[in-house]
Amino acid sequence: MTSRVYVLAQFKPKEGKQDELFEILKALEPDSYREEGCIQYMLTRQISHPSASNNEYSIVFNEIWENAEAWTAHGNRKQIQHFFETQVQAETGLVADVMVTAYTDEGNHYDHPVYA
């Protein structure tokens, strides 16, 4: 097992703002891939498919970080903080809601701290 952290950062765009939000989020990809500990940082859009449910969180970053420290460092970057301040927290932002969840592939999860 590894100490990798698998993150789903799901975004619910405000009405009619999906394309604009997708472009803003896409601009975060190149620099994030250059961060130490970044294994994957892929922006995806929800599709309709008979085997899948749809939800309002239609834009998702699928992230893999070498460890919790690398993920924390990513969240502390000025570019990421600026995005959350201007697009999530600000009234004029494009994000109606965001849900970030983190996972590990380590064995007995009761012996390991939850990464936040």
Image: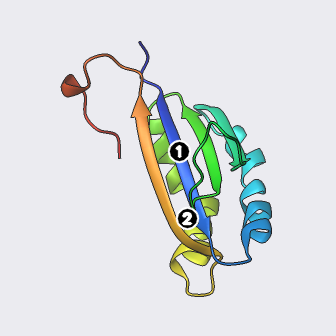
Image: 33 above or below 97: above
Q: For the point 52% across and 27% down, which residue is it?
A: 66
Q: Is residue 97 left or right of residue 108?
A: right
Q: For the point 68% across and 45% down, which residue is it?
A: 32
When asked about the image quadrant of residue 96, the answer is bottom right
Q: Is residue 13 left or right of residue 10?
A: right
> Which percent across, then down, holds residue 38?
61, 34
| Quadrant of image for the N terminus | top left
Out of 34 and 86, give the one closest to the viewer: 86
> Which percent across, then down, holds residue 59?
66, 55
Marks 2 and 1 sit apart, C-alpha to C-alpha, by 17 Å
Q: For the point 80% across and 62% down, which residue is it?
A: 23
Depth check, mark 2 against mark 1: the one in front is: 1
Out of 115 and 55, give the one closest to the viewer: 55
- Three-letter residue code for mark 2: Gln
Secondary structure of residue under mark 1: strand
Q: Residues within 10 Å of mark 2 (few under 14, many from 20)?
A: few
When asked about the image quadrant of residue 26, the answer is bottom right
When asked about the image quadrant of residue 83, the answer is bottom right
- The residue at which mark 1 appears reads as 8
- Tally of numbered tags: 2
Out of 62 and 48, give the one closest to the viewer: 48
Image: 99 above or below 14: above
- Three-letter residue code for mark 1: Leu
Please tell me the numbered disc located at residue 81: 2
Residue farthest along the bottom direction in this orientation: 91
Q: Are marks 2 and 1 in contact (CB under 8 Å)?
A: no
